[in-house]
Amino acid sequence: MNQKTAVSNNSLLDVKTIAKMAILGAAAFVLMMIEFPLPFLAPAFYKMDFSEVAVLVGGFAMGPGPAVVIEALKIVLNLLFQGTSTMFVGELANFLIGCSFVLPAAVLYSKNKNRATALKGLVAGTVCMALMGVIMNYFVLLPAYGYFFHMSEEAIVGAGQAIFPFIKSKLGFVAVCVTPFNLVKGLLVSVVTLLVYKHISPLLHK
């Protein structure tokens, strides 16, 4: 193979990778729109969706870098079609929380591509997402939502108290509502990802 052919093949590979990331980014955005609350865990303004399934599929197939790109594309598409009500604060926080889930899983899987490693990566990602969720909700998301939607801290805590009456503070709200919500989300997304990845991955490796 001469240099010209090698360059041509690399360019084709780049085009294919970009196309795959674009398709998965669009799929993640569509899945993001199909959201629903988990009222037994958290107030209705916390919504569950399966958008990270598309991001994880891309991360497992193409690596952690493309996973970050797909996550970013999802957020950008959401901004284009839905706009922002928090001056991009909520979107940035959601991007960071999403990356905290998909990156550990994609990094671990890239080192040893088998089902056991995928499972370990998904567990690690779920734990990281739960931890990042605590930090981002306590310091960024809840203050931002309180500011932009004119909700006091007492009102936010009160929404949690309606489900768990023993919640007394913002920290209690994050620990009792947000953390279990993210753990359940990580579990459900992980199960779906494990079920669909082997069926989708051959298409991504063509």
Image (tube, helix red, strand yellow):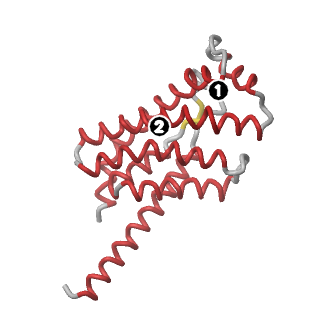
Amino acid carrying mark 2 in the image: Met
For label 2, the crowd category at 10 Å Cα-Cα, with few meaning under 14, some 14 to 19 and many 20 or more, is many
* Disc 2: which residue: 129
Element type at mark 2: helix
Whole-Å distance between the Cαs marked 1 and 2? Answer: 19 Å
Q: x, y (%) of residue 145? A: 71, 37
Q: Residue at x 48, y 32 (%)?
A: 130
Please give left or right for residue 185 compared with residue 75 in the image.
Answer: left
Q: x, y (%) of residue 9? A: 29, 79
* Label pair 1/2, CB-CB below 8 angstroms: no
Instruction: Give the vertical position of 8 relative to 139 (above or below).
Output: below
Q: Looking at the figure, which quarter contains the C terminus?
A: bottom left
Circle on res. 125:
none
Q: Nearer the viewer, residue 84 or 38?
A: 84
Q: Nearer the viewer, residue 145 or 163?
A: 145
Circle on res. 43:
1
Between circles 1 and 2, the one closer to the viewer is: 2
Q: Nearer the viewer, residue 197 or 127?
A: 127
Q: x, y (%) of residue 190? A: 39, 38
Q: Which residue occupies the extreme right position in the image?
A: 150
Q: Quadrant of residue 195?
A: top left
Instruction: Give the vertical position of 97 relative to 11 (above or below).
Output: above
Q: Quadrant of residue 12?
A: bottom left
Q: Residue at x 65, y 29 (%)?
A: 44
Q: Looking at the figure, which quarter contains the N terminus?
A: bottom left
Q: Nearer the viewer, residue 55 or 195?
A: 55
Amino acid carrying mark 1 in the image: Pro
Q: Residue at x 47, y 47 (%)?
A: 99
Element type at mark 1: loop
Q: Residue at x 36, y 38 (%)?
A: 122
Q: Which residue occupies the extreme top position in the image?
A: 166
Question: Going from the N terminus, do you reach mark 1 or mark 2 first?
Answer: 1
